[in-house]
């Protein structure tokens, strides 16, 4: 029996083949078209991606931010489907030629990361989306050390990797001082398979005490309602920083 990693890699490569087989004029340099093609493909293929209905929830949160987001951290790249969507949203908010737009996305598999980079290039957002390979905590720490991500410089963090790491990676963002008042934190799959410690932490407001990041949070049910499938998106806002 094939391992889970092998299945994920095979499915990722199949998604790349699907996109490459489509008419290039319709997809080249068109991030929304690439995202929608992948979302359509995911309905019949065994493909993990942030479905359109859930993306609508996140997009609404981002477009409602008082200060439009420019810098996004994504924990869990897979084939780059949601990273492409974040880039498209940033461009929509700031214009196609805006500077300082960055999506830093973390993937543990080099094989899968190669697929993501190929699809990101098709979408024409390789100037915005930066795929980093390795454990997310190590990649994020490296970005900070290199000065690519600065204190208070993260407008949105998106968690869609292994749920057991949601809370520790959120706390790492806090420890590195990356959030500002108004930053968004969005997480997928908090209902199934679930991230109870992450939700408990957010609903408590954070670590507590004066020198801590504090949140308000809400669970939003997407229109993508399938029995025994994840339907919720956790949308949190930073309301205080040390």
Image (cartoon, rainbow, N blue to C red):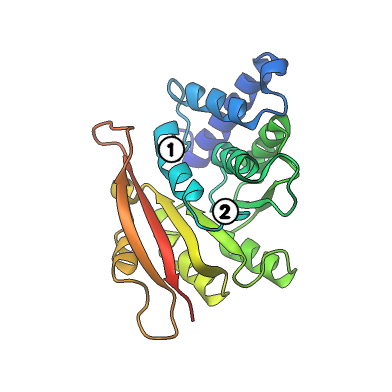
Where disc 2 sits, the SS reads: loop
Residue at the bottom extreme?
210
Of residues 122 and 153, the one nearer the viewer is: 153
Can you identify the residue that label 1 sits on? Answer: 56
Residue 102, percent across and down? 67, 52
Residue 181, percent across and down? 49, 69
Quadrant of the image containing the N terminus: top left
In this picture, is 40 found above or below 131?
A: above
Foreground label between 2 and 1: 2
Q: Is residue 113 left or right of residue 183?
A: right
Where disc 1 sits, the SS reads: helix
- Mark 1, Cα crowd under 10 Å, few <14 / some 14-19 / many 20+, is some
Give the label on residue 15, or none: none
Q: Residue at x 44, y 49 (%)?
A: 61
Whole-angstrom CA distance, mark 2 to mark 1, is 16 Å
Disc 2, disc 1: CB below 8 Å? no
Can you identify the residue that label 2 sits on? Answer: 68
Res 70 quadrant in image: bottom right
Residue at the left extreme?
227
Q: Residue at x 50, y 34 (%)?
A: 7
Residue 146, percent across and down? 75, 68
Q: Residue at x 68, y 31 (%)?
A: 123
Q: Is residue 33 left or right of residue 226?
A: right
Res 136 quadrant in image: bottom right
Is residue 229 visible in this depiction of the protein? yes
């Amino acid at each position: 029996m094939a391992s889970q990693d092998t299945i994920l890699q095979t499915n990722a490569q199949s998604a790349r083949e699907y996109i490459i087989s489509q008419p290039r004029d319709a997809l080249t340099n068109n991030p929304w078209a690439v995202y929608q093609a992948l979302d359509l493909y995911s309905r019949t293929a065994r493909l993990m991606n942030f479905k359109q209905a859930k993306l609508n929830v996140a997009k609404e949160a981002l477009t409602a931010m008082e200060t439009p987001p420019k810098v996004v951290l994504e924990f869990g790249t897979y084939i780059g489907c949601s990273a492409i969507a974040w880039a498209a949203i940033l461009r929509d908010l700031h214009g196609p030629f805006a500077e300082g737009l960055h999506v830093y996305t973390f993937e543990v598999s080099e094989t899968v990361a190669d697929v993501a980079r190929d699809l990101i290039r098709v979408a024409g957002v390789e100037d915005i989306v930066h795929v980093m390979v390795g454990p997310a905590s190590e990649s994020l720490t490296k970005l900070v050390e290199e000065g690519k991500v600065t204190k208070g410089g993260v407008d949105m963090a998106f968690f869609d990797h292994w749920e057991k790491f949601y809370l520790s990676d959120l706390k790492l963002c806090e420890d590195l001082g990356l959030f500002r008042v108004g930053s968004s934190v969005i997480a997928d799959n908090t209902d199934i398979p679930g991230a109870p410690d992450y939700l408990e932490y957010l609903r408590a407001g954070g670590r507590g005490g004066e020198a801590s990041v504090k949140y308000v949070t809400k669970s939003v049910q997407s229109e993508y309602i399938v029995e025994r499938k994840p339907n919720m998106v956790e949308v949190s806002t930073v309301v205080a920083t040390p």
